[in-house]
Amino acid sequence: MPKLLVAPSILTADFARLGEQIREAEAAGVDWIHLDVMDGRFVPNLTFGPLVVEAIRKVTALPLDVHLMIVEPERYIADFARAGADWITVHHEATPHAHRAVQQIKELGKKAGLAINPGTPLEALLPLLPELDLALLMSVNPGFGGQKYIPASTERIRRLAALRGQMNPACLIQVDGGIKPVNVAEVYRAGADVVVVGSALFNNRPVAENMKKLLGEVYA
Ligand code: DX5
Ligand code: ZN
């Protein structure tokens, strides 16, 4: 099975020393940096905009994976692309024009992702699946780090992996929310290519120790 990519979500990192935490994650061997952009409307939390992406771009050469949890994301895609995003993911539920948003991301030379919430039928991804670089299955209700993995997500990963195999084998499956050492192997075996991990990487112990624990479960 392909190597599981780990994308730490900085939402639960220590923002008072964000650069240090990014460097710590990079030294621990993470693959991407996952940036949770929230507008307080699509989700009940407010985080950061292109300014922070620009600052992080100066700190790491790792791919920046920007997760737009904002309404009408088309308004800001160009700003995040300019700020240094490599992957830009919009939510199907956040715009009536998901197809246009995906086209816009690709026209800017970035990798395009489409995300769906746990309550959104998998079928919502299908019309665009052939054109996606990434399909993001939320395994928590978006808005906060530190939530519990929704167990029904595993079957959704399995079903999406089968559909991806038929419709777009190059599309990566990303799973985001509540990923821990206790469930990461199940998520990987179900077909996830990328896992977003926030609190399980940045909380309690040094990132390197948390990363070792996480991957120890995957490749056990
Ligand atoms: C939630 C975000 C996730 C979250 C992951 O809306 O999209 O990326 O920060 O954090 P954990 O791993 O703690 O669930
Ligand atoms: Zn996220």
Image: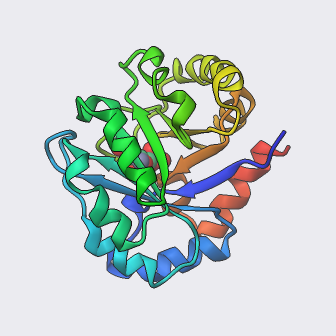
Would you say residue 145 is visible in this rendering?
A: no
Left or right side of 40 for 55: right
Which picture quadrant has residue 103? top left
| 167 or 151, nearer to the observer | 167
| 7 or 216, nearer to the observer | 7
**Residue 125: percent from left, percent from top:** 46, 24
Up the image or down, 6 lies above or below 86; here it is above
Left or right side of 79 for 207: right
**Residue 175: percent from left, percent from top:** 54, 38
**Color theme of the render:** rainbow
Residue depicted at x 60% and y 22%: 160
**Residue 208: percent from left, percent from top:** 66, 68
Up the image or down, 169 lies above or below 158; here it is below
Up the image or down, 71 lies above or below 81; here it is above
Residue depicted at x 48% and y 75%: 21
Residue depicted at x 84% and y 39%: 1
Quadrant into which the C terminus falls:
top right
Would you say residue 116 is visible in this rendering?
A: yes
**Residue 158: percent from left, percent from top:** 65, 20
Q: How many marks?
A: 0
Left or right side of 162 for 91: left
Left or right side of 169 for 156: left
* Residue lying furthest left: 41
Which picture quadrant has residue 205? bottom right
